[in-house]
Image: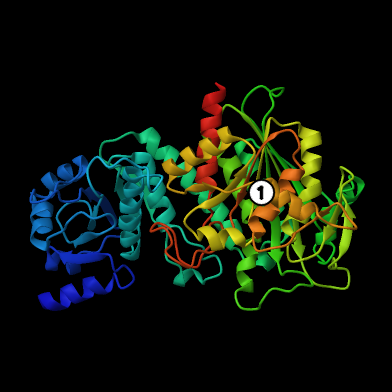
Amino acid sequence: MSSYRDVVKAARSLLTYERKFHVVVANSVRAFSSKCEKPKGVVVGAYQKDGDKPIRSSENAVLLDDAVGGRIMSLIRERGMDGRPGKGLLFNGLEGEFSCVAVVGMGPAGAGYNELEELDEGMENTRIAAGTGARALQLQRMAEVHVDGMDFPEQAAEGAALAVWRYNANKRKKNRLATPKLHMYGKGDHDAWVRGLFKAESQNLARRLSDTPANQMTPSIFAQAAVDALCPCGVAVEVRSMDWIEDMSLNSFLMIAKGSCEPPLLLECTYCGTAPEEKGILMLGQGLTFHSGGLCLKKKTGMDKYRGAMSGAAVCVGVLRAAAALSLPMNITAVIPLCEHMPSGMAVKCGDVVTLLNGVTLGIKNVDKAAVVMMADPLLYAQANFKPKMILTVGSVARGVSYGLGGSATGLWSNSAFLAKQFRKAGSITGDRIWRMPLFRYFREIITDNSTYDMSNCGRGPASSCLAAAVMHSLVPCLDWAHLDIRGTGMTTQVNPLPYLLKDCMTGRPTRTVIQFMYQMACSQS
């Protein structure tokens, strides 16, 4: 029989990578003498201490504590847990059906909207608590994780499902960290829990598409992945070939695509949730499956992250899948141009000029600023063909927004105060915030002040994201339009990532915010 000290040491070693938890072995004999084929763990919450008052747990935590004879609360008090968000204790060897019990801080009771943070802190604290607890139990090799719905079952499901997912398709099976099955524990709104799982799984789909290496996510592979993900949900997917793109004269798209041996494709994905004759929302997602910078080659350090330059397209696929799963009563169409941007003898050159479908000439001063060029003609085509009531463009377009906002929020440019207000509200609910950026005439004057062509793809000066948005805005003359630049949020987050996401991995942001925005638009419609 191992000594008590050895038991504690072994239990603690299981959480080498989870510094936020303390490990408590409640029964050393049970911890080593019994092995479950499918061990189960449970996550419950505790509110932050209010002054000298004793710590208070969630309703489901009280029921669990009663089931184990009050041992959980007594151990919590012994260890001095204070209930701060994301901080907690992990108990091994308690009697009952669960091998491990994670008690995680939920923050102050009754937390709500924080105007300064533009965030519903109660919902976000629930995501953090559920995600931290679920990940800790995953590291303990739990096959099933039951999660307390706490105050917000939908947000608990989101946090847990996002936290336990990771891209590991290229690791050997024996070296992969298994993803546990998630269940709701105790009382609560089960329908809300299921909605949260749908939203998180849609973001995880976007994470998978974005994180896959570029040689395993070419335009044709992405198209097949979109078909596999959307068609079973009832979303129609039309795959347009290079011949069709040439016939439709989408020349700005072809200018970027011609540098690669991979043929470009264009996807038209249609979700019909109401009468077909009703005008819907058009999404345009940037689908650069690899962005090398072309002849203006990017630096070799960190170039691998530009496999995520198609994160805008991945967000569109995730949103459509969630819309179908949630049966939103609205029509949504996504147009997704897919290509690689590579240097070659056929590649677009600095100073080339292309005539767009509306007759405007676009000068390509910097071929590294390829996003607005490849999206220009598809945007004009989609407006004329689908006649939407509003347009949403999504892409990792320019790095300026990441200098200004980092990973804190996604930059929004819009010609509609109503759409900006709806996105702001959606971001505060999902915890994936949106920040409106300026769309001044100042920026349009910069991109149109040229002597030999009508408009430049990059203009002059450091405000690269605002200049790119000005180019996109000039192509939408008379419709409500919003543009999300996800360069700082949709690709890898290296500084202060959200606790339920992973550092140095693609985030899939802001998929849930766009889903919430669509839900709000559907509600205002009905």
- For label 1, the SS is helix
Label 1, on which residue? 226
**Residue at the image point whose x is 23% and y is 49% from the top:** 45
* Residue 414 locus on image (x, y percent): 62, 41
Visible in this render: residue 454? yes
Q: Is residue 21 left or right of residue 2?
A: right
Residue nearer the viewer, 208 or 151? 151
Report the quarter where the C terminus lies: top right
- Neighbor class of circle 1 (other Cα within 10 Å; few <14, some 14-19, many 20+) is many
Q: Is residue 325 left or right of residue 18?
A: right
In the rendered image, which quarter is residue 210 located in?
bottom right
* Colour approach in the figure: rainbow
Q: Is residue 468 left or right of residue 85?
A: right
Q: How many marks?
A: 1
Visible in this render: residue 2? no
Q: Is residue 257 above or below residue 53?
A: below
Q: Amino acid at mark 1?
A: Ala
